[in-house]
Amino acid sequence: MKIKEVNILIVGVGGQGTLLASRIIGKLAGLYGLDVKLSEVHGMAQRGGSVVTHAKIAERVYSPVIGEGCADFIVAFEKLEALRYTQYLRDGGTIIVNTQEILPMPVITGAAEYPSDAVKTLKRSYAVISTDALAIALKSAGNAKAVNIVMLGILFSKMGVTLSDAETALAACVKPEFLEINKAALKAGYTL
């Protein structure tokens, strides 16, 4: 791994696998002998609410929470969630965003509008990698639930992690019967 110290904010909505993604990042840090602290904020996750996970990796980590302006990467499993958390990105950091839309309750009820230009807005101010991770998950793994793993593949590639090490961390966190599907999704994201 090229980076010896990295702060990663993972954002999405309940059910998208942000917590599994953070556990895989934790296992990866362990492979490199690095310290890792994870902090999860679930909110109303069971109802499709916002879920945020802080992952801090370094030789020694003293606090589990990433401060505003300190995230090297924001990995957003849904594009509105990327907009919500941009204040955490450091100068020169990167947002990796899935272009999928999951409508929040205020949009469903008509009380608010979903921003039609979320990715375009992000690209005006930040370094952004946007992709349709849902389509990639369906094509590579045949499973919509693999979006989180596609996104991790992109992240790990940008971090300079080898695909072999990423697969080892993945294997430590997913059930054996789902490993091949997830490996396919990881590789598809990694090789984008």
Image (cartoon, rainbow, N blue to C red):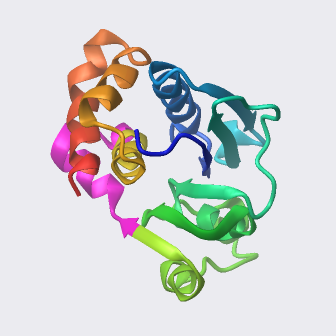
- Report the span colored magenta: 130-146
Asked which quadrant contains residue 76, the reply is bottom right
Name the residue at the bottom extreme: 124
The residue positioned 63% from the left and 35% from the top of the image is: 58
Viewer-proximal residue among 162 and 52: 162
Name the residue at the top extreme: 176
Q: Is residue 134 magenta?
A: yes
Q: Is residue 103 magenta?
A: no
The residue positioned 43% from the left and 62% from the top of the image is: 100
Which quarter of the rendered picture does the N terminus lie within?
Answer: top left
Q: What secondary structure prevails in the magenta region?
A: helix
Asked which quadrant contains residue 110, the reply is bottom right
| x and y, in percent, of residue 66 in the image | 76, 48
Asked which quadrant contains residue 167, the reply is top left
- Decide if residue 175 is in sight here: yes
When the figure is inspected, residue 154 is found, relative to residue 119, above or below; the finding is above
Position of 88 compared to 140: left or right? Answer: right
When the figure is inspected, residue 107 is found, relative to residue 67, above or below; the finding is below
When the figure is inspected, residue 14 is found, relative to residue 88, above or below; the finding is above
Viewer-proximal residue among 66 and 141: 66
The residue positioned 36% from the left and 13% from the top of the image is: 175
| x and y, in percent, of residue 38 in the image | 69, 31
